[in-house]
Amino acid sequence: MKICIRGARGSIPTPISSAEIAEKIADVLWSTQGRAFAGKEEVMEYLRSLPLMQRGTVGGNTACIEVRQGEEAVVLDAGTGIRSLGSDLMKGPCGKGKGVVHLLMSHTHWDHIIGFPFFQPAYVRGNRIIVYGVHDELQKRFEIQQNPLYFPVPLNAMPAEIEFRQIREGEAFAIGSLRIRTMELHHPGKAYAYRIEDDTGLFVYATDGEYKDLSQAMMRPCLDFFRDADILIFDSQYTFHETMLKEAWGHSSSIIGMDIAVAAGVRHLLMFHHEPANQDKRILNLLEETRRYCRHAHPQARCVVNLACEGIVLDPSEPPVEIAF
């Protein structure tokens, strides 16, 4: 099992601005003072040696995670990140009308479903797309988004076979070799975390959750669900102070995530659902603050914390390392 980040922004797609790109270019040019390059390949080699956030970006696409395992695609949420995933899947069986995609939905707020109308495999006859979710009337929610008032292609006009399966919270089910369970999170309209494991590792996806009562009694179910995860993707949209101000908005902070991850024995914490108002530098500062907090509050902790950035691929079976962003 491998985990690929396709979209990590929260609330609304957030393309990087021209001003931010110019600032990144200026930083790179400044770092090359006195250095000569023989050609473009040497320039590219130098760029690849730079920290990820200096040569790239956290990304602006909303929530979408690809779980790579076997022939069938397993996807968590259909934010705008699912569009590029669909393009890649078209290079395989999906491009021949022989693909199977399993789409697990945390919830159906727009930032988590907005990419589905642009998912290319859904436009190829013969492909099967199975959508799983705990919420009632899951199919109706997708149909509403593609009502002709909002989108030109209705759901029932997509040529692929699209099946909706309602699952029960906490009830175990399997997709191939993956064993999966869900847990309700505190979020307006409810959202659900997914615990996914196979013989190679354990991955927990827990976006869009708010944690107000951190007492042991209230946190026990959450800690049990996250227990011993090799990778935990956690909603870190706000600072700790913002979580106190934005009561009932349904999001959390990396500081709370760090405390939970350490208490649950998580090996690798990924900050996710990044605030759309935050540029890359601000998000990077939040990561550095979280790492400092961990060193101070949990000096014996073995949990590594990183940012969820588009394009990152992680293997739960490998020891986690701090990424130089």
Image: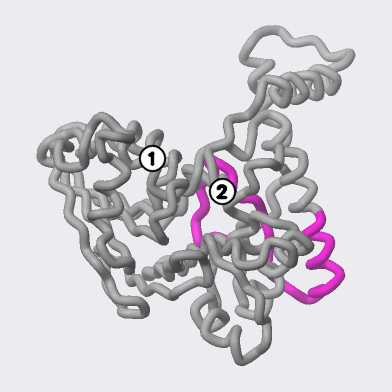
Residue displayed at 64% across by 20% down: 44
Side (left or right) of 234 relative to 256: left
Is 112 located above or below residue 61 in the figure?
below
Q: Amino acid at mark 1?
A: Gly
| Mark pair 1, 2: CA separation | 13 Å
Magenta-tinted stretch = 289-318
Mark 1 neighbour class, 10 Å CA radius: few under 14, some 14 to 19, many 20 or more: many
| Residue 238 or residue 201, whichever sits in front | 238
Q: Quadrant of the N terminus?
A: bottom left
Horizontal and vertical percent for residue 24?
74, 25
Q: Quadrant of the C terminus?
A: top right
**Residue with the most extreme front position:** 149
Q: Which residue is mark 2?
A: 10
Q: Which mark is residue 43?
A: none
Q: Secondary structure at mark 2?
A: loop
Side (left or right) of 297 relative to 206: right
Q: Secondary structure at mark 1?
A: loop
Q: Verify whether residue 113 appears in magenta.
A: no
Residue displayed at 76% across by 52% down: 286
